[in-house]
Image (spheres, rainbow, N blue to C red):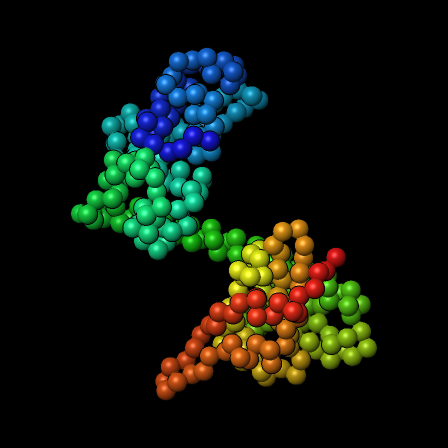
């Protein structure tokens, strides 16, 4: 896909105008149209990734989002137009630097290309004079990126919990209770049994990562740790889903203990960040 630049943004507007005024039977026919100096198929792909155009039965067409772009252009709202297009680009294409935006705009611009910075500069988003519109743009994008990351983490967590449900069913020959679906306040995710012969309750907190064991980490909250210490039988299931293999480490609270902070004076810890690597020898492949 072509890279973001001022020329690409202006060319995308010309593409939308051409699609609005003329009907093309196919992308091939559109490719013959002399719209800009850019390759039309590449420009269409860029605009499609941003959500401005689509193909209906192989026929190129404008989306409702694309028509919104044209409306801003027709009204002469050029700053709003550029900021809207940049927001679409960041949130749909997700350039590598976009995950830095929640840490501040300077953290993101460090990794931008010269052409990308030019686009943001033209949109007034890099101005030193921070008017409410600029602050709102960066805050809105940052919040959407955070929400997207939280959803991805939640989806990954659910995969690990499903794996634990299957693992426990096979291990104990008894259906475990998926507690986290009903409540996130229990202090554990799955309620199972110690074994197929011992029906004593086993509480399981599931932690999942798609990173490698060397790079993955998990968080233990003070509430989870309190439940773990008060329980007769409690374990942590660490699922490493990096690559095609499913790796599981079953870790006891005693093994977690060295990583747990202590409260001092009136201060209380809320969450501890713990590396998977500390339990590398516990991991086994689950087929």
The answer to whether residue 237 is visible is: no
Q: Examine the rendered structure and indicate whether residue 205 appears above or below residue 247.
A: below
Residues 135 and 106: in front is 106
Residue at 55 percent of width and 80 percent of height: 257
The quarter of the picture where the C terminus appears is bottom right
Expressed as whole percent of the image width and height from the top left, the position of residue 161 reads 64, 62
Q: Quadrant of residue 89?
A: top left
Residues 69 and 250: in front is 250
In the orientation shown, which residue stands out farthest toward the bottom?
A: 265
Q: Examine the rendered structure and indicate whether residue 127 appears above or below residue 263.
A: above
Q: Quadrant of residue 211?
A: bottom right
Expressed as whole percent of the image width and height from the top left, the position of residue 151 reads 51, 53
Residue at 73 percent of width and 67 percent of height: 168
Residue at 41 percent of width and 80 percent of height: 268
Q: Examine the rendered structure and indicate whether residue 19 appears above or below residue 103.
A: above
In the orientation shown, which residue stands out farthest toward the left?
A: 129
Left or right: where does residue 8 sit relative to residue 63?
left
Residues 135 and 99: in front is 99
Left or right: where does residue 105 sit relative to residue 148?
left
Expressed as whole percent of the image width and height from the top left, the position of residue 145 reads 42, 50
The answer to whether residue 283 is visible is: yes
């Amino acid at each position: 896909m072509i890279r973001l630049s001022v020329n690409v943004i202006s060319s995308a507007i010309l593409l939308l105008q051409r699609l609005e005024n003329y009907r093309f039977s196919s992308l091939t026919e559109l490719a013959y149209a002399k719209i800009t100096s850019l390759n039309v198929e590449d420009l269409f792909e860029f605009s499609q990734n941003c959500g401005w155009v689509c193909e209906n039965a192989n026929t190129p067409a404008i989306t409702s989002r694309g028509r919104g772009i044209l409306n801003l252009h027709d009204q002469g709202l050029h700053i709003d137009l550029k900021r809207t297009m940049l927001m679409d680009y960041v949130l749909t294409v997700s350039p590598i630097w976009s995950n830095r935006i929640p840490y501040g705009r300077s953290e993101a611009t460090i990794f931008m290309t010269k052409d990308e910075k030019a686009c943001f500069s033209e949109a007034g988003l890099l101005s030193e004079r921070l008017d409410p519109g600029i602050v709102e743009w960066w805050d809105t994008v940052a919040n959407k990126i955070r929400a997207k990351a939280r959803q991805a983490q939640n989806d990954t967590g659910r995969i690990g919990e499903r794996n634990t449900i299957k693992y426990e069913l096979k291990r104990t020959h008894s259906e475990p209770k998926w507690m986290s679906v009903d409540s996130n306040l229990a202090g554990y995710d799955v309620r199972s049994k110690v074994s197929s012969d011992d029906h004593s309750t086993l509480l399981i907190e599931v932690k999942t990562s798609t990173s490698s064991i060397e790079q993955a980490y998990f968080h233990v909250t003070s509430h989870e740790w309190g439940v773990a210490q008060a329980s007769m039988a409690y374990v942590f299931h660490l699922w490493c889903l990096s690559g095609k293999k499913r790796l599981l480490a079953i870790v006891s609270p005693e093994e977690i203990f060295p990583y747990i902070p202590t409260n001092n004076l009136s201060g209380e810890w809320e969450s501890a960040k713990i590396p998977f690597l500390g339990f590398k020898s516990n991991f086994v492949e689950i087929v």
